[in-house]
Image (spheres, grey):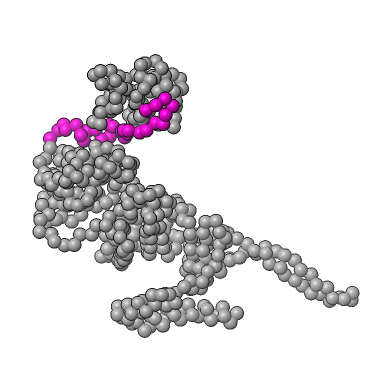
Amino acid sequence: MLSFAVTDSVLQPSTAIDVVRHAAPINLGPVYIYTPDLEKTWSRYHVAAFFSGSGTMIEAPPDFDWRKYSNMFRDFTVYRADTILGPLTPVYRSLNRDFYQPYMDRRGRYWTPRVTAPPESSGLGEAFAATLGAVSRRSAIRSDIRALALEWLHGGVVRFTFQRILKKRCFHLEFEIPSLNQMTFGRFLLPGGGPIVREPGQFAAGCFHHGEEDDSFAQALRGPSVGATDGSGDNRPHFDPRAFVANDETMYSLSREGNGSAGPLVTALTVAIIDAAEQLATSSPKGRLSKPLIAALDEVANVVRWTKLPGLYSHYGSRGILIMAILQSWSQGEDVWGAKGMSKLWSASNVRVYGGGVAVDDGNFLKDMSTAIGEHWEITGSVSNSGNGRSVSKHRSKERTLTEAELEALPRGRAVVRSSGNSPTLVKTVPWWEGPNKDAVVASIKVHDPEPEKTLAKAVTKVGAVDAVELVA
């Protein structure tokens, strides 16, 4: 390898390559340039070229250690230029070397876990080896964790079995590792919405060093212990969220509030499914799911208390993952996400629906809703008689379309819909007994409801009364 340092006050990457091509005998053949950001200008670049024993320019070896020969940038990308003024093609990217390098330098003491490696044809070998090096290093995760086993299960899924030494309890943690193809094309994200994985070592460090900040990882470390350290003898069905999102299936997650609630489990299940959908969308054409996934999160503030949801709402929409968060009131959302978080979630929603039931004194929600709905023109007239005859006068004035009191009293069966790019609209909702699934719902109520007749009569009467009043009016 022949390397060059190009310096100036302001340089474009293409200019640095052009300088090297004219100053050295490398006019033809591939040239490689280190740069932190291709869109910005820098005062110093590192340019490299490779030659055979006979002096002919050749391509960089596939296993070339780009990090070893870079002392200019902490985070960098290596681009290849084949011709003069030709396009720059990325061939290597290093992210935060200091962050993940300690997990791959093989220093320190290591556990000797039992290993079940993936087949060579899977393309997971490099990531699996890096992960094994990370989990088997003593105190890499926590000082009281002993690695017992790392097993490949199926696809990209591996299972890590470990022991909490002081508590003498064992745990399983299943997670997905990236294949060489996913890393090459930038189709794998670190857990918790981290950066795109480009290298095996980056994944290993990110998964376990940064993993303790991730809710799912922390819950696994605090979760219930497993009966056997090697996981043998467990024949229970295994739910694979990746297989679920790849098929046309529906998941109904139910829980109650209060003591004994399965809310945390429902939350973890919901997050796992949506994370799997995001990973599938990342590898799909245009970065979106070919068939959108709809997550209707009823009672989201009580059952699915997903603290990171407001920050992900808009991003999921761009991936073809449609989140429908249903709340009883604005203040209920503030209890979970805070005032800023609730406002962020509301602003990120493309369709906002108000179905009534919120009190006037519940903050400024109804006031803001009334303002957003706006005003309309009303024409009023008056008639007066005098000695000169009869006169009629009219005048036009603006009136609030729906006041706060009217919004509070919005009857069942009516809703206000505000969608991006459209004016607010008052709509009539379609109850289930007027839909195509009426017979199935009635049959389910009769089987599971302790008082099915009262439930059915009460539901139909409440909305039917509204329709009758409007018909009379």
Q: Which residue is the extreme one toward the bottom?
A: 453
Q: Position of residue 6 (x, y in %)?
A: 39, 19
Residue 131: tell me if it is visible. no
Left or right: where 7 falls relative to 262 = right
Does any portion of residue 217 appear in the rendered image? Answer: yes
* On screen, residue 8 above or below 179: above
User: Which residue appears at 42% of the width and 65% of the height?
Assistant: 328
Question: For this rendering, which residue is in front, 157 or 25?
Answer: 25
Q: Which of 175 and 153 is in front in this view?
A: 153
Quadrant into which the N terminus falls: top left
> Which residue occupies the foreground of this view, 322 or 62?
62
Q: In the image, residue 225 lies at what x, y percent?
A: 15, 55
Whether the magenta-drawn stretch holds residue 93 is answered as yes
Q: Is residue 154 above or below residue 126?
A: below
Whether the magenta-drawn stretch holds residue 145 is answered as no
What is the count of numbered marks?
0
Rendered-image quadrant of the C terminus: bottom right
Task: Name which residue lies at 39% across and 31% down.
Answer: 88
- For the point 32% across and 41% down, the residue is 185
Image spot of residue 358 (x, y percent)? 48, 66
Picture coordinates of residue 140, whole percent (x, y): 19, 39
The magenta-colored residue range is: 82-109
Nearest the viewer among 360 and 179 is: 179
Q: Quadrant of residue 5?
A: top left
Image vertical order of residue 15 relative to residue 152, above or below: above
Residue at image position (24%, 52%) is: 219
